[in-house]
Amino acid sequence: MRKRLAIVFLLFPLLHYSQTRSSEAITPVDSCVSSDDVHLYRLINEYRLVFGLEIIPFSKSLCYVAKTHVRDLFANRPDLQSCNLHSWSDKGQWTPCCYAKDPNRTSCMWNKPRELTTYMGDGQELIMWENIPASPQSAFDQWRSFDLTNDMMLNRGRWADNEWKAIGIAIYQGYASVWFGEVDDHEPSLLLCENQNELAADWLITEIHETPEEEAEPEEAVPDSRYYLIVSSFKEESMAASEVKRLQAGGYENAKALMVDDNFRVSIYDYTDLSEAQKMRRQLSNVFKGIWIMEQ
């Protein structure tokens, strides 16, 4: 039985700053972003708008850093043997590190944008892995469901004094990575991988500001959102059904399977109140590793 696993990490900001930069670092001219990367960028920034926060400009340099990292993780697995997902292998033109036990881990992480690109600021990373192909929505939902990762996206808590001026995103296989920076990126516009069309760093800002306001039309009543506690995910409906049956036999009578993004997500509880869902997730986090909240 193939259960869905998810691991979420973020790099905590420390009182450290380094100007180390490779003299040969340059962002490849043909570096591009996928439609999934763009989708996740929109999800994060539209979420920020709800809380009155500014849209963060899309960074070609930080997108390249994120893209390089997820491919290194997939191909070389530097996160094994007590190292976590912020680790980098020794298989590329960068400084390797085992994030968790390497004494130089802080500078290793923060310097990556300068090692790989012309970006002059530190980088701070949100990263996750799951054992099925990651989707923009699943990555966003998981980061939003944990207090620390949610705070990082919304500049709250320990990130309240940070001002994000650049963001880079990459999704690859089961990995999703987001890099934040406090320095403007002066690289030119990004390219879309699917068609090589140019995408300006401020495209979403321009789109939001230039969208004309239309006269509101009467809308039909829409049911309130529901928040599902997801404990596993499957490609096959039969396997999801078996897991639901097992959970129900174990006392989770409300367990059910939901088809989302061509996957069957198994939920054990669902709520109309997000705070209630978050409370239950915390209570069950030791029982179901990687349990997360999905909104529908």
Image: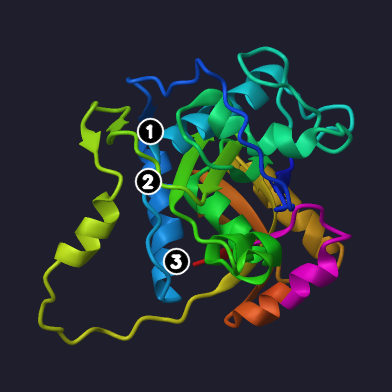
Residue type beneath disc 2: Phe
Q: Of the residues shown, which amino acid type is indicated by label 3?
A: Tyr
The segment highlighted magenta reads: 279-293
Q: Name the disc covering residue 71, or none.
A: none
**What distance separates the C-alpha of mark 2 from that of mark 3?**
15 Å
Which quadrant of the structure image shows residue 91? top right
Total of numbered circles in the picture? 3
Q: Position of residue 253 (x, y in %)?
A: 76, 71
What residue did someone put label 2 on?
58
State the mark number for residue 33. 1
Report the quarter where the N terminus lies.
top right
Looking at the image, tell me whether mark 2 or mark 3 is earlier in sequence order: 3
In the rendered structure, which disc, 1 or 2, sits on the residue that comes first in sequence? Answer: 1
Q: Say which element carries label 3.
A: helix
Residue 47 is tagged as 3
Q: Are marks 1 and 2 in contact (CB under 8 Å)?
A: yes
Q: Position of residue 135 (x, y in %)?
A: 51, 44
